[in-house]
Amino acid sequence: MSKFFGFGRKQILRRVGLMDQVAGVRRYTLFDGNERDVEAIDFRTGTGFDFTVVPGRGMDITSAWYRGKALAWLSQTGVVHPAYFEPEGLGWLRTFYGGLVATCGMTTAGAPCTDQGEALGLHGRFSTTPARNVVADTRWEGEDYVLRASGRIVEASVFGANLQMDRTIEATAGKNVIRIHDKVQNIGYLRTPHMYLYHINLGFPVVSENSRLHSPTRAATPRDAEAEKGKEQFAQFDPPTPYYKEKVYYHDLVTEADGTVKTAIVNENLEGGKFGVSVTYNQKELPFFTEWKMMGEATYVVGLEPANCRVEGRAKERERGTLIELEPGEIREYHVEIGVLEDAKAVDAFLSSMVKV
């Protein structure tokens, strides 16, 4: 139920002329520099939890705040227009703004590689593809005032893939949770590789030397020799460190009976209290979970990454026999929730609800 300062639907409607006074969405276009003409939508939930969806960049989520506290890491590039995208090799990094959610896929994700003669760049084209059929809406649904944006991403090529993704992003006014629902369908006539990863990038002040990753982890496997160093501290974080090299861990997680996985990063001592961000998803939809630990100066971020693949590239997935391919007409659906744990009470309640290892 939507609550504003203790008031419900009937009470609040007697006190405002327009619901935008307390919560809403606003659609606009960015203007300056190489972000010019990127379409964006601001969400205001009425609790102090605000975030920005960018239909002009794959319906992903850039900035997010709770009462002035940033949740997401933002990179040096800013929200670059897709026209500047460099698909070859590591060129994706030139337009990687960080953000709360940067989706990777749909036909490839992870490291650059060559798969069956096709050269593939880092993380695919998803986050640099503008959405079609964009709608931003607010409405009462019973006692809930729902804020919603939807749009469609198409990855298509003559003689190649034709995948369509319909995304809905929702928040309920008076609450501190984002709900993402994606439906990917092969609308073409060829069997098509499908790799999909949510790059959820948490930054300062959620991430600090006082922070910790909470997850039902049985084991965390280092991706490479660099991640082997200090692998026992995969859940602990350092101050910004000069010349730090990224560490990547693959987590083997315990799930609830229905496949649900709950994870969170919690700053144990932010202004004298606890504060964090949670990520909840279903392992039946997204069987892999990768942690990207990057403690560098300015590039100070921890990525929580539910996915249907690992991050070594499509050729490796094919070699391992784990590459998902969609048959013509086949549909895959994904659900992810990102929440704010605003104080010790919220943190403790969330952590106590997590399945025990």
Image (spheres, grey):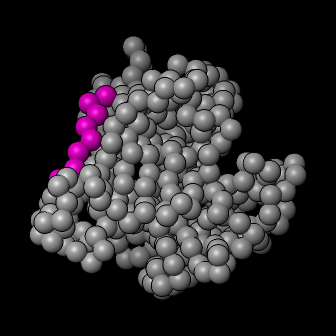
**Residue 144 relative to residue 306: left or right:** left
Residue at horizontal 51%, vertical 45%?
62
Tell me if residue 152 can be seen: yes
Residue at horizontal 53%, vertical 60%?
68
Position above or below: 9 against 163: below
Depth check: 138 or 280 in front?
138
Asked if residue 348 is among those painted magenta in the image, a careful observer would answer no
Q: Place residue 240 in its image quadrant.
A: bottom right
Rendering coords of residue 45 (x, y %)? 34, 59
Q: Quadrant of the N terminus?
A: bottom left
**Residue 245 relative to residue 252: left or right:** right
Asked if residue 133 is among those painted magenta in the image, a careful observer would answer yes
Rendering coords of residue 308 (x, y %)? 48, 50
Rendering coords of residue 46 (x, y %)? 34, 62
Residue at horizontal 71%, vertical 66%?
208
Residue at horizontal 63%, vertical 57%?
203
The magenta span reads: 132-139
Tell me if residue 228 can be seen: no
